[in-house]
Image (cartoon, rainbow, N blue to C red):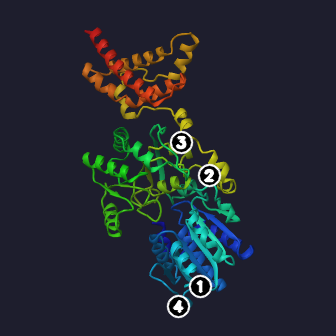
């Protein structure tokens, strides 16, 4: 919406004008060939800003601009935006083998791989390029082109000035970082929608890290494709996002297909999209998604950049990531504001909120840019996140225990008391089972109702067992699974005994 407005009026918002001044101050005052990086959140309109930079730069200097993108869709979108600003431009794509007509244009839009091939083959020689603009500059693929533009000023543009590769920091290629408006400020000024964040407790111990520093697809598929996690995803959707246009992000094609089958079976209108779909299939699926009010689209990272569907109301992170860039990109897909939409929901099933903090929290981008190794090495690990998690019973479930005065039980506190008294640690779990049985009986008509109610405590039982296993320092997967099964069995037995005593 904001981009359409800017194109039709051909003007910029106040914050974009301020950023434009800062950028031109750097371009004009720094020596030619100095590389600058500009940060603006997803949804802030960075294409609008660099389109106006292109228009102004070509007019004022008489030198040409080349805009580099990493995806074919982004090339088309960028070219269209530039035309909206009155900048005639040519796309250098795979069909363009030579540039006989380059004197007719002051601006070119090129995909990084295509341009690299043409320059290597020496079939294309670009003349009088004063400014190179790199969209989504955090991708490392652009580095190979820097050697061809040593005399030009390079302006990298990104929402997250952090390279995913710890060995290739962005500060090696860019000398200055210009920070744009923050997410919080853009929400307050009603340029971005507010995110309502819902964090679900998941134990990620089985996930493995790959050589790129993020979780492997194989271990993610195994974890998120299991029956328990698919059930948790469906429950989370029904709790928070039911009836809304929903985008689900997964880390593997297998997981996304399982998600598709699970939701289809439950009677929901869902489609699956991955990079194996043809261009026509992709267009048809995205058209369906845009025009179907309660549509659910399950995908595999393909929609993190170059995809803009303002009507998205709910984002589900059905994956874990250690990439700050990916975290912001995924949530950013729901942040577009509309006349009838000023907030959206984010359901996190990968401990991402605990790892990176709330989406709209302040971020010190200068520190991350200058000391990326320190930032990457200090990202919270999954064990610490798990230990710090505090379970809160959902309001809907809490209402089912309204006849009980107290429904909470603090495993850690009770363990300290039991330990101080020299009693056996197992007594803590017995007390917990007793408390759960009591509230189930208090809020049920008969033993069958109570047992149904006890089944709804599965999340809390899992949490209490985990807290107990931390206390006794036995945190193995098999032991916790056995404890949970034993707990549930003893809870059923305790409920039966309590009802028998009432008769």
Choose mark 2 or mark 3, whichever is in front: 3
Calculate the distance from the C-alpha at mark 4 to the C-alpha at mark 1.
Answer: 10 Å
Calculate the distance from the C-alpha at mark 3 to the C-alpha at mark 1.
Answer: 49 Å
Choose mark 3 or mark 4, whichever is in front: 4
- The image quadrant where one finds the N terminus is bottom left
Of the residues under marks 3 and 1, which one precedes in the sequence? 1
* Corner quadrant of residue 435: top left
> Callout 2: 10 Å neighbours few (<14), some, many (20+)?
some
Instruction: Tell me the residue at 49%/52% (across/down).
Output: 194
- The image quadrant where one finds the C terminus is top left
Calculate the distance from the C-alpha at mark 3 to the C-alpha at mark 4.
Answer: 54 Å
Instruction: Tell me the residue at 75%/75% (across/down).
Output: 31
Choose mark 2 or mark 4, whichever is in front: 4
Q: Which mark is residue 125?
A: 1
Of the residues under marks 2 and 3, which one precedes in the sequence? 3
> Callout 3: 10 Å neighbours few (<14), some, many (20+)?
some
Q: Which structural element holds mark 2?
A: loop
Q: Nearer the viewer, residue 199 or 168?
A: 168
Q: Position of residue 278 (x, y in %)?
A: 34, 67
Q: Which structural element holds mark 1?
A: loop
| Callout 4–callout 1 Cβ contact below 8 Å | no
Q: Which mark is residue 100?
A: 4
Instruction: Tell me the residue at 35%/42% (across/down).
Output: 230
Residue tagged 3: 354
Instruction: Tell me the residue at 52%/46% (across/down).
Output: 209
| Callout 3–callout 4 Cβ contact below 8 Å | no
| Residue 24 seen in this snapshot | yes
Against 84, residue 260 (above or below) is above
Q: Which mark is residue 363?
A: 2
Q: Which structural element holds mark 3?
A: helix
| Callout 3–callout 1 Cβ contact below 8 Å | no
Q: Position of residue 399 (x, y in %)?
A: 36, 30
């Amino acid at each position: 919406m904001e981009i359409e407005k800017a194109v039709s009026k051909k003007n910029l918002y106040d914050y974009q004008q301020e950023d434009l001044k800062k950028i031109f101050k750097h371009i004009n005052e720094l020596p030619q060939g100095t590389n600058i990086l500009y940060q603006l959140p997803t949804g802030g309109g960075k294409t609008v800003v660099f389109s106006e930079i292109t228009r102004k730069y070509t007019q004022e200097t008489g030198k040409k601009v080349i805009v580099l993108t990493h995806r074919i869709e982004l090339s088309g979108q960028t070219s269209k935006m530039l035309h909206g600003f009155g900048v005639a431009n040519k796309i250098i794509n795979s069909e363009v083998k030579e540039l006989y007509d380059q004197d007719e244009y002051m601006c070119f839009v090129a995909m990084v791989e295509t341009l690299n091939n043409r320059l290597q083959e020496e079939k294309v020689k670009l003349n009088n390029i004063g400014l190179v603009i790199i969209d989504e500059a955090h991708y490392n693929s652009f580095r190979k082109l820097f050697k061809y533009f040593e005399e030009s000023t390079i302006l990298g543009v990104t929402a997250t000035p952090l390279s995913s590769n710890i060995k290739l920091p962005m500060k090696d290629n860019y000398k200055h970082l210009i920070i744009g408006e923050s997410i919080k400020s853009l929400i307050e000024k009603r340029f971005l929608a507010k995110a309502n964040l819902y964090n679900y407790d998941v134990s990620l111990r089985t996930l493995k890290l790959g050589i790129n520093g993020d979780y492997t697809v194989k271990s993610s598929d195994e974890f998120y494709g299991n029956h328990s996690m698919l059930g948790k995803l469906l429950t989370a959707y029904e709790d928070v996002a039911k009836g809304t246009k929903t985008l689900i992000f997964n880390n593997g094609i297998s997981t996304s297909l399982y998600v598709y089958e699970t939701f289809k079976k439950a009677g929901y209108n869902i489609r699956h999209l991955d990079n194996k779909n043809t261009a026509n299939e992709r267009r048809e699926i995205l058209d369906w998604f845009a025009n179907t009010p309660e549509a659910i689209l399950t995908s595999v990272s393909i929609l993190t950049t170059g995809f803009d569907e303002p009507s998205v109301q709910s984002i589900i992170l059905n994956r874990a990531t250690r990439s700050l860039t990916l975290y912001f990109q995924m949530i950013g897909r729901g942040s577009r504001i509309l006349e009838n939409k000023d907030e959206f929901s984010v359901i996190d099933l990968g401990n991402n909120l605990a790892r990176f903090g709330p989406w709209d929290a302040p971020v010190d981008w200068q520190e991350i840019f200058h000391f990326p190794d320190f930032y990457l090495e200090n990202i919270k690990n999954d064990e610490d996140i798990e230990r710090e998690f505090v379970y809160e019973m959902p309001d809907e479930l809490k209402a089912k225990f309204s006849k009980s005065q107290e429904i909470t039980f603090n495993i850690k506190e009770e363990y300290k008391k039991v330990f101080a008294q020299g009693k056996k640690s197992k007594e803590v779990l017995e007390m917990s089972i007793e408390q759960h049985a009591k509230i189930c009986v208090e809020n049920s008509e008969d033993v069958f109702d109570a047992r149904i109610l006890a089944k709804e405590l599965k999340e809390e039982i899992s949490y209490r067992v985990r807290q107990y296993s931390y206390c006794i320092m036995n945190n193995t997967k098999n032991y916790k699974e056995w404890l949970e099964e034993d707990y549930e069995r003893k809870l059923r037995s305790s409920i039966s005994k309590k009802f028998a005593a009432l008769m």
